[in-house]
Structures are given as structure tokens and as C-alpha cells.
Image (tube, grey):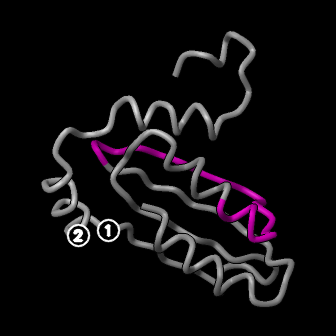
């Protein structure tokens, strides 16, 4: 992801550029793989009185954590803590969130489910 060192700071633009330049030539196999490997989202409201923990497991790809975190922030949710790890081709992300607006949690669930 060249450009970060040259002063460019629009991460969304850099991620979109990388994806367009590295798009798969044949989308049919990717669609079938997508159906088999949909992201798994688990929420935990019991571990903390003041926050919700959201775990996302998905196939690793450039910009995935950024897209999910941007979606969460766009919903008006505060990301208190984010832990991101990669194991083989899988990405595990754990976000600790504080819900600020009523109804944000339902919107967040829909956003995370459609992140890929």
C-alpha cells in the first residue's frame, strides 16, 4: 500500500485502489468461496456492564479491519478497544464498544454481517 510514506492519508481511497488493482480475474469461484466462508459475528453483553464485545472472524483481506471499524464508527459507536490477529488466512477481530445511540446495536449487527 504505497502512498502512506508520501503523505497520502486517505486510507479508504488507498484500500479501494488496492482492491481495484488486485481484483480477481474470475469472480465465480470467489462467490462460491464467499458463500462457504461468510464472516462469523459473536456479541457478548454479559462480560461488561458498560460495553459490548463484538468478535468477528472472517477470511483475511487488505482493508477488512478498516472497513469494519469505519462502519462501527459511522454508526456512532465508540470503539473502546480493538484487538486484531491473523491466523493462517483468517482474521480475528475483537471490538469493545460503547453504545451511544439507541438502535445503534441493530444497525451495527447488520453492518458487520454485510462487511464482506
**Residue 102 at what x, y percent from top left?**
82, 89
Quadrant that contains the C terminus:
bottom left
SS class, disc 2: helix
Judge by depth and name the residue closer to the eye, 55 or 106: 106
Q: Residue at x 82, y 79 (%)?
A: 50
**Residue 64 at what x, y percent from top left?**
49, 49
* Segment tinted magenta in the rendering: 71-89
Left or right, 38 with respect to 1, comes to: left
Tell me the number on the disc at residue 105.
none
- Residue tagged by mark 1? 38
Judge by depth and name the residue closer to the eye, 25 or 32: 25
Q: Residue at x 20, y 38 (%)?
A: 25
82 magenta-colored: yes
9 w.r.t. 44: above or below:
above
Q: Quadrant of residue 58?
A: bottom left
**Residue 34 at what x, y percent from top left?**
25, 62
Judge by depth and name the residue closer to the eye, 72 or 29: 29
Amino acid at each position: 500500500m504505497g502512498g502512506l510514506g508520501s503523505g497520502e492519508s486517505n486510507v479508504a481511497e488507498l484500500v479501494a485502489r488496492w482492491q481495484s488493482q488486485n481484483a480477481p480475474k474470475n469472480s465465480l469461484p470467489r462467490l462460491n468461496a464467499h458463500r462457504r466462508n461468510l464472516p462469523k459475528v459473536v456479541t457478548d453483553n454479559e462480560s461488561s456492564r458498560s460495553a459490548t464485545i463484538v468478535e468477528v472472524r472472517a477470511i483475511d483481506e487488505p482493508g477488512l479491519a478498516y472497513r469494519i471499524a469505519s462502519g462501527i464508527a459511522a454508526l456512532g459507536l465508540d470503539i473502546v478497544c480493538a484487538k486484531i490477529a491473523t491466523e493462517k488466512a483468517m482474521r480475528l477481530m475483537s471490538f469493545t464498544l460503547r453504545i451511544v445511540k439507541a438502535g445503534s446495536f441493530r444497525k451495527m449487527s447488520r453492518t458487520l454481517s454485510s462487511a464482506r
